[in-house]
Image (cartoon, rainbow, N blue to C red):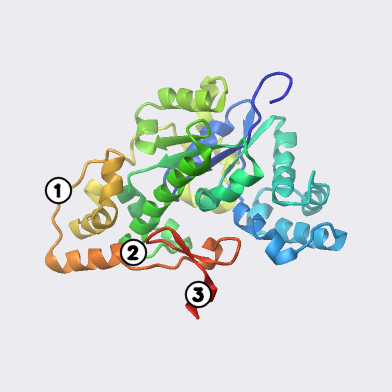
Amino acid sequence: MPADGKPTAPIFVVGHPRSGTTLLRLILNAHSRIVIPPEAHIASFLRRLKRKYGDLRSDVTMKRVAERIADKERMREWGFPREQMIEALVAAPSRDAAGLFRALMSLWTEQENKPRWGEKTPGTYRFLPEVNAWFPDCKVIHIVRDGRDVAISCLTPPFSDNYDKGNVYEVAVRWRHAIHACRKAQRDFLGNDRYLELRYEDLTDDAETKVREICAFLGEDFEPAMLDFHKSSKRNVARGDASFHARTAQQVNKGRVERWRSEADEAFVCGFEGVAGEQLRDFGYSMSGYTPPGDQRLRILWEKWRPRRLMHNYKPADGSSPDLRKGQRVDPASKG
């Protein structure tokens, strides 16, 4: 903590995609001391630095890494000149994942003249052990939204056109896994002082109360301007994400709460509840009362318990593969 007593610990906003992470980012970004840029999807890259590039003490290797990062599509959307970004990365305070992360975020703290940075990429929940190792003082905010509404949003254009999330069962498994991963991080190393769980529905029901709670968790003063984030949201949403976040130009509202009651059929709802009903109840979400027919019950059992291997970028940094069903890591060598 600096001499003025104000906190500067990094902030990580995580959660399953379409759960309200962008809304929360814009609210926090409206604080006079906090800057949270558009999502970068950079943690998944940085965690594999050593395995992919070896010793970064080599200037040649470091320059190659910097160029690779600067050329990522998400980085280009940040709007900084490529050479400026490469120069900042090469001059990072340390040639490791934490140093490169800080170098990237310093571009924003200097541009916005704010002392504290945060990062919002929903899927970073998968990499919280690495994030914790890089930033042992970081604060993590996990926002959770009714998974049935998440599934509708994930499977509806324009989001589904760009991000293939499969069917309702796949979304239910991933939503369930996000909760498991975040709560495991809370138990294993974050604790209650550095981990906050927030329901999207509670934020939309009483935004000021919840934002005040978030500020208290972060050690920041509440600022009314945080609730007026929508007045500047247009310039703070990346161009590539604009079609997904049209509603961020509005004040916080409950317009998208319980969409599933009017927009989903019984089979859709039964599919999600069958896979992740325990987690829905755990978060206080009311159940539909629907009963799946016999053939769907068999499908639910299969989808709920069958082993799944995630995409390549979900793999742990050591090269092993996680099993979503049990949250286990499977060593590729064990497969023969």
Could you tell me how far apart the alpha carbons at marks 3 and 2 are, in whole angstroms? 30 Å
Spot the residue most to the bottom. 336
Residue 179 higher or lower than 322, as above or below: above
Residue at 27%, 48% in the rendered image: 278
Which residue corresponds to the image point at 53% horizontal and 41% vertical from the top-left? Answer: 189
C-alpha distance separating marks 1 and 2: 21 Å
- Pick the front one: 163 or 94: 94
- State whether residue 48 appears in this view: yes
Crowding around mark 1 (Cα neighbors within 10 Å: few <14, some 14 to 19, many 20+) is: few
Judging depth in this view, the residue of 191 and 99 nearest the camera is 191
What's under tag 3, amino acid-wise? Ser
Question: Disc 2 marks which residue?
Answer: 167
Q: Residues within 10 Å of mark 3 (few under 14, many from 20)?
A: few
Find numbered disc 2 in the image and state the secondary structure of the residue it sits on.
Answer: loop
Query: What residue type is disc 1 on?
Result: Gly
Q: Nearer the viewer, residue 166 or 143?
A: 143
Three-letter residue code for mark 2: Asn
Q: Which mark is residue 334?
A: 3
